[in-house]
Image: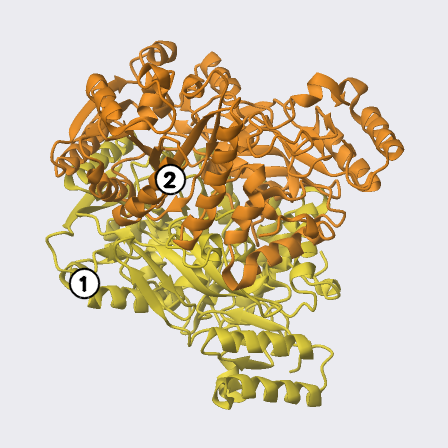
Chain colours: A yellow, B orange
Amino acid sequence: MLPSGISIDAFERALDAFARAIGDEWVVRGGKELAEYRDPFAFASSDPAEFAPSAALRPGSVEEIQAIVRIANECRIPLWTFSRGKNLGYGGPAPRVSGSVALDLGRMKKIEIDEELCCAVVEPGVTFFDLYDYISERKLKLWISVPALGWGSVLGNALDRGIGYTPYGDHSEKLCGMEIVLANGELIRTGMGALSGAKTWQSFKPGYGPSVDGLFMQSNFGVVTKGGFWLMPQPDFFIACDLHFERESDLEAIVDITARLRREEIIQNTAVLSNAVRLISRRGARSQWFAGDGVVPDDVVEKALRESGLGAWNLTFATYGPEELADGREKIARQAFAAIPGAKFASKKFNVKATPADELAASMGSESAQAGVPSLIPLGVLKYRGEDGGHLGFSPVVAPSGKEAVKLANLVGTRCHERGFDYYGGFSFGVRHLYSVMMILYDKQSDEHRVQANKLCEGLVVEAAKMGFGEYRAHVAYMDLIGEQYDFNNHALRRFIETLKDAADPNGILSPGKQGIWPRGTRPKRNPV
Amino acid sequence: MLPSGISIDAFERALDAFARAIGDEWVVRGGKELAEYRDPFAFASSDPAEFAPSAALRPGSVEEIQAIVRIANECRIPLWTFSRGKNLGYGGPAPRVSGSVALDLGRMKKIEIDEELCCAVVEPGVTFFDLYDYISERKLKLWISVPALGWGSVLGNALDRGIGYTPYGDHSEKLCGMEIVLANGELIRTGMGALSGAKTWQSFKPGYGPSVDGLFMQSNFGVVTKGGFWLMPQPDFFIACDLHFERESDLEAIVDITARLRREEIIQNTAVLSNAVRLISRRGARSQWFAGDGVVPDDVVEKALRESGLGAWNLTFATYGPEELADGREKIARQAFAAIPGAKFASKKFNVKATPADELAASMGSESAQAGVPSLIPLGVLKYRGEDGGHLGFSPVVAPSGKEAVKLANLVGTRCHERGFDYYGGFSFGVRHLYSVMMILYDKQSDEHRVQANKLCEGLVVEAAKMGFGEYRAHVAYMDLIGEQYDFNNHALRRFIETLKDAADPNGILSPGKQGIWPRGTRPKRNPV
């Protein structure tokens, strides 16, 4: 595997130059170690040449990244940048363009925290576990926000617009100030970081004049080497709320009420709505419930629900703050959901202020994500189908309206069942939007599963877009297809972004094809539609 | 006055082309009407050729703007875009480069509101008064957020990163989705607007892939023709809080407490801290208190404070929500400020839900801004010095820390007094930063005032930057000087932005020099430092 248009000799010379810049032990030239940089689930095709890197580089400093970028420009080597590469459902570390050199930032693990201003500056290799441990060890009264799995990069997750489950769960929104190596090797700091000696780099996002931060999200415009994050002041109390609703047809009312409470900031964190299959799948192999192939029959699901005390829809969220405010919010939410007949509302209050952090963490089950405690618990779903489970998601953005959510859920549920997959579904509630959550859990050993999962995803991207739903994130295999749906004025926005891309990265060395943005000369590689 | 390098004949031909595109009655070729497009306070120099447009265009539609941009490219005419041009302290509608053609978007006044999703889409000509009236007439349960003066553009204010005084007071942060005419005449929609038919344009800011919205703020990258805004669901109650502190030396404690309460979202809106002169200046001509020239002596200020019941520092903010939450927040804030000896805390509760909007508005004084009711009340300060008063601001961003605020206030106060101006000062509290507020109120008829005001501002920009404080906004006369302070890695960020600018606007027709960003070929015009 080589970068396109590069001879073996030229490639070897480039790798030698990289090795001189960062040390030979940090250049991965092949073998088992390089195989780790492939798509871990490889569902879209069984072609080993697809989404495969030619080598990997593991720099340890900003200066080394600058050196890498300069060599890549000279040698015309495309780099595929990632922080930890742990976003397995989106392809993990796998590059869009085969033959790209993986630029693995996992070794860069510096953490700085300003306790007075409640913020952190982290390098890309810092995981949620790392940051949590750093804060715990120093007994700082600060909370982080974590996604479902804690092994990923704090910075990489925010740049990919990941979410967590505390009031600081919109991770890209809590990112304040970046340091970036540009495609030409120059180092910039954004926002107030552009003023040398400013103490406001982590206080004020925009800075002066045009703000470029958004350009570096889900993007190939630069290599982000530091990111500032706002951390949540530890609240005195938090109350985890857990609701169960009897009927599938409750969906419209649930969404309307949750969306209103979220908009009014009664519910302060990412509320999570889950259907039956989503919760059942966490309890291990599906074969415990159902021995057959195809979709689990309704009566089996209902039996499992009854036995486990779950509802057709299940909602979790939390309230936070001084006790009287956390209590007040819980009460208002409880009253609001009482409008849905049969709704069951349970809550559990945690006295954060009076409880040592380790004791608090030990007292929590699935609520831990709502308190920013990282875990790997949700990995359990990979045991749902087959011994060697994979997952693939479809996550369009939905307007915070019950009617819109019903429309989308009906589409996704129907299409899942048509392809023989259970509908693992739900919604995550931002302040002003919903993400639809759908995961295809499949057996990696089954060719039929892989083919059907791929067809299901492709079909949903196109069909949902026609109904006005666009995805906010993408597996490498779907980056072009999803980008294609963003078609206003014949893709005028993409043309504009690619014009900027060509100016910022004239040799097209940084992550070509990322999120459907291609450098000049490589655009014919964009997947035809 | 002509655009640089354009002959009279060529200019006349360009104006004729503009007139054919938008109608002759919307082309302003000179005279008194054109004089309205100058800096209303013209403090920096008395040269009539400075910051003066050559003509003005008043298009009525997106298509007309596209036509204007195409003609400007053909004829190499620089356009200076603004919405209402009412930001008088920053130069109003005056262009950075004399001879630019003013592109006045004031005629574009469409408003659309989605009541279910609590958002609006407005064109650039819509003022805060317009939007408020639109909502009032339809009795919608929605609040807007307004800056000190209601005559400006809702969209223009947000693009310039203006602020208001409700919980939605960070206006650029509440902007969700834009429509933009690019320099090449193409129309883009950002975020989810790039997906034709998406119902999420006003729900989800980032969209898919790199986000370009920040590039169009305080910028010359395009002409923004529509902006989406989140509107605040009308709260049941709001409680306006008014605090007075006895001693100037209370500043550090006040800032630390307010910043903490803001970060913890106990205080939900932009809290405003004002020193004595700032409040006294609202009560009309300074000559009522002090007949002399120069700085008002301390004993006169103290007498005025005693007579009016004000403090050396005075803080206003509000709490909002269902009654129990608004009450709870007020109580927590009251307890927190009791730590400062002599602090006086007064509050006034408004039952919004039970009061018709017009009655509510009529019952409010200066609290009206906290409820999003637009006014022109603060214009009164222009009567403070001389019959024909001007004002000029210095607004650096400060980290939310008492020590930092004291450092900045000492600097600004000292330098004001050295130049013979009263120190009109204070701070506005965002969630994670402060804006320092300082206004020089001066007599426009006094050459000495104008010269001193200019020297004061120039000196403060440079001196404050050395201490780590950078301004977030700029009068046209200071755009370069302020940009110059953002110097990390020898202005690497500015170089990057100008690289993008050249790609987006190769002929440099859009607002050259805006916020210190110059198109290729015009960079020698940047003010030398």
Describe the element under mark 2 as helix, strand or loop: strand
Q: Is residue B362 above or below residue B394?
A: above
Residue identifier under label 2: B436
Of tags 2 and 1, the one toward the viewer is 2
Residue type of the residue flagged with mark 1: Lys
Q: Residues within 10 Å of mark 1 (few under 14, many from 20)?
A: few
At 60% from the left and 33% from the top, the residue drawn is B45
Q: Quadrant of the C terminus of chain A?
A: bottom right
Does residue A311 show up?
Answer: no
Residue type of the residue flagged with mark 2: Ser
Marks 2 and 1, how far apart at CA: 33 Å
Q: Are marks 2 and 1 on the same chain?
A: no
Residue identifier under label 1: A139
Is A174 in front, or is A341? A174
Describe residue A266's horizontal placement relative to residue A422 as left or right. left
Describe the element under mark 1 as helix, strand or loop: loop
- Chain under disc 2: B
Q: Quadrant of the N terminus of chain A?
A: bottom right
Quadrant hosting residue B427: top left
Is B486 in front, or is B481? B481
Image x and y of residue B36, in percent: 65, 21
- Chain under disc 1: A
Quadrant hosting residue B477: top right
